[in-house]
Image (cartoon, coloured by chain):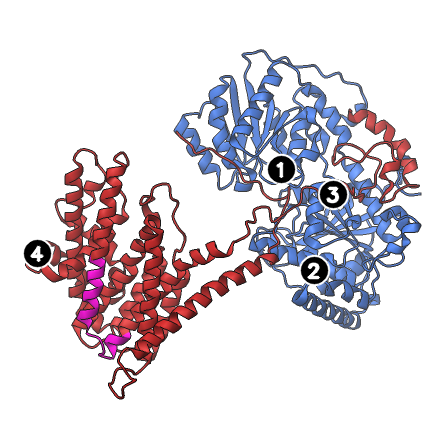
Amino acid sequence: MTPGTNGSTTGSSERVRHKDRTRSGSRRRKRTWKKLLWVKQSYPDNYTDQETFLEHLQRNPRLQPYDFWPLVADSTVIVQHVCSVIIFVVCFIGIFQDRVSPVAVVGWGSFATFLGWLLWDWWLGQEESTKPTTPPAFSSTPLAASASSSVSNLHHSNGNRHINGNGLLTKHSYSASSASLYSHSSNGYSTNGHASSASTPAPKFVPNHPSPHSSPLSHRTSLRLSTAKSALLIYFTLLGLSPILKSLTRSTSSDSIWTMSLGLFSINIFFFDYGSPPSRSSVGGGNKNIPASLSTNAALMASTVLASRLPSTGQVFSLTLFSIEVFGLFPVFRRYARQRSWRGHVTLTTLLVVGAGGGVGLILGHGGDGHGFWDWPWKSGLLGVVIGVLVTGLAMGGCSWWLIGLQKYKNEIHGPWDPARPIIRREDY
Amino acid sequence: MPYNIAMVSDYFFPQPGGVESHIYQLSTKLIDRGHKVIIITHAYDGRTGVRYLTNGLKVYHVPFLVIYRASTFPTVFSFFPIFRNIVIREQIEIVHGHASLSSLCHEAILHARTMGLRTVFTDHSLFGFADAASILTNKLLKFTLSDVDHVICVSHTCKENTVLRASLDPLMVSVIPNAVVAENFRPRSHPSYPPSEFGDQMVPVQQHLGPHDTITIVVVSRLFYNKGTDLLVAAIPRILASHPHVRFIIAGSGPKAIDLEQMLERNVLQDRVEMLGPVRHEEVREVMVRGHIYLHPSLTEAFGTVIVEAASCGLYVVCTQVGGIPEVLPSHMTVFAKPEEDDLVAATGKAIAALRSNKVRTENFHDQVKKMYSWTDVAERTERVYDGISGVLSEADFYGYDAADAASWSATRGRAGVQSFALIDRLKRYYGCGIWAGKLFCLCVIIDYLIFMFLEFWAPRDEIDIARNWPKKSRVENSRRDHRTFKR
């Protein structure tokens, strides 16, 4: 229909309009109402068509209702992280109250990290053998592996010091102010890598990128070598930094430190990247495997200020190294382990929950002083484990149930007024 | 019956834009119809005090702090004294606010209701419901529109959106589209309009496009994300690659201009795509008549005046099917595309093919658009809204109730078909806005009422001078008005 014919008939139909301008009057009219602006229609401007009004309204179009058990399973990631933070705090308190030897803490931690690195290396080898076409160049592995082997070198490799790297890095860190000192140490495991790659004639990132297929065996070996090197660098940097860290907050009162570290740990927990990376390749995805930097930085800063409360250099060094293991490397490993084996993930979660519960129990309880038959040393620890497991289970179940209950308040409205999402093909020019 | 109307909005000339020209054109046409119209806006650089525009349109530039993109700082009450003064001075009966982001308009509607005036609100834009800014705006809109007499939206999609955002009765929302001044957007070969030969018959000649003639695609748009510049950036190289005799002219500026330029450099398309930068509204026609197709890749649009302007210039329109755009133009003038790169390329290809085969009679578009959209029509329909809220039209006429339907008398509307001004009735309407918001809004309204009482005492009405009206033209258009009038 052309607008011209419409215009001529409008005048006559307007005469009729007043008699039957009703809500339900559309059936009596000859022409039905159309949702068009360019047609002159014989309906009043505020006419609301009962059939078509809001017909494109969508409520909660992308709502996927949660199921209970998958939700509980997903919440293990949060439990793992909270537990590792608790374990770290427990270790700090143990060291602070002289109940645990710092060497034991860092020794066991490093041993576990070394085991983790071995496992990682084995998984990596497996992956390379199954998928020889994918280039194994991903940035997180050398970082993670490097620092993890730094701990391994704690025990047996004091003999082969890299004088150049050590000298350079200690000089660098001493020249830094105390403010940048923190940032340096908090980014320890990444900045050191860059510093070493800049200083040493054979940068450690080189083997990652060019032609990984040329010699796979030497590639793996060089990866391990570079890992060991950056681990050593971190180790010596921390050793050099420890005296400074020890005096970092001498003029600050302990209460401020506890408050600050509590706040920083909260930031760490709330801003931690709990999401699982897309599983297009099990390890790859580049930066995706490195958890959110704000969270990591907050945790390392918290551990730094906590470490600065400790009286001796050895304790400071142990705690800082332990914090790098717990907050820098462990999340990477956890994430990878979750992708590799679900059973391992559950086992790890259980171990962490047991460890955290037992640790809290030991710290809070005063058992183990040997008085009476019933007061055997691990009583409070065992009690802590039981309570910890119970509380964790209840929290996981309860929060999941609560979240499912909250779903009914979800009311998302979509319609033609929303800005469209443009669908653009990935530009391939 | 002539009304004294005050148009209130933050957005008015000298700032260019769609809302601004809408207010100006509507006011001018309402003055032509015998009403008295004034405009209240905030002070712009170099524009303060009172100004007269063409046709005796009086503009009050009220000094106010501008915070963001010509919107004033929302202070809720500080506008009241000067607003009351203007209203009394000009003997205003109807306050008509424009644009939902204008805080001046919202405050004016609130104060006008306190003073016992009729209020109308025109919504020009679409808002989502998801992001924080929209939620806040929607809450404020709900506050203002809880007690408004009538709302005008520019398209049916806009009406649905506003009804949802402000929880309104759909019957008190009218759809009155924007319009274009067709004389300003005539095709290239079209002679200019001398007013004397307005009715002359001109037979437009059809332009024939050969298979190798160059087809020019025009894009006039601010280059923002929500105008779909990303789609444009992705589509242009593909369109140009598949159609050798096609050129682009892009007018407009914005943050996405850099993406467009990078695309041109990457694909070495500088000789086939002309970037004009920002153009003024008066020059848009000069740009449009250089082309054959108008491409409009916007992602959201309440009405899309620019596609009407393009069609009026005789351009074949390719546009995305979003917001109110599908309602605006008939299908023989447009090719619709989904907001997807592939579909946009395909639709443009279809439009090019249709033009090459000379199937589209673009030379007739101008006269057709002129019949569809005119500001005179908009003014007439707006006048009917004024009649309805003033009680000139009966409730049954205006809201469309049957006599049998009288039981559906709602709490939002008074018995006379118009909203009651009693404070307690107003508070009832505001109270329903939300658990906390309702109480807060009620508090605001009570304070507003107390301020009004105080002002009545402090600056009594009879001490305020009445402004003299602009000498009116003799009502020659009475005859023209009568044959299309909406009221008895």
Q: CA distance from mark 1 to mark 2?
A: 28 Å
**Near-viewer residue (B319 or B371):** B319
Q: Label 1 lies in what chain?
A: B
The chain displayed blue equals B
The three-letter code of the residue at mark 3 reads: Phe
Percent position (x, y) of residue B194?
Answer: 76, 25
Q: Label 4 lies in what chain?
A: A
CB-based contact (under 8 Å), mark 1 and mark 4 = no
Q: Residues within 10 Å of mark 1 (few under 14, many from 20)?
A: many
Q: Which residue is mark 1?
A: B322
Q: Earlier in the sequence, mark 4 or mark 3?
A: 3
Q: Which residue is mark 2?
A: B143
- Please tell me whether mark 3 sits on a helix, a strand or a loop: loop
Q: CA distance from mark 4 to mark 2?
A: 72 Å
Q: Which residue is mark 4?
A: A163
Classified by dominant secondary structure, the portion drawn in magenta counts as helix
- Residue B462 in the figure: left or right of residue B70: right
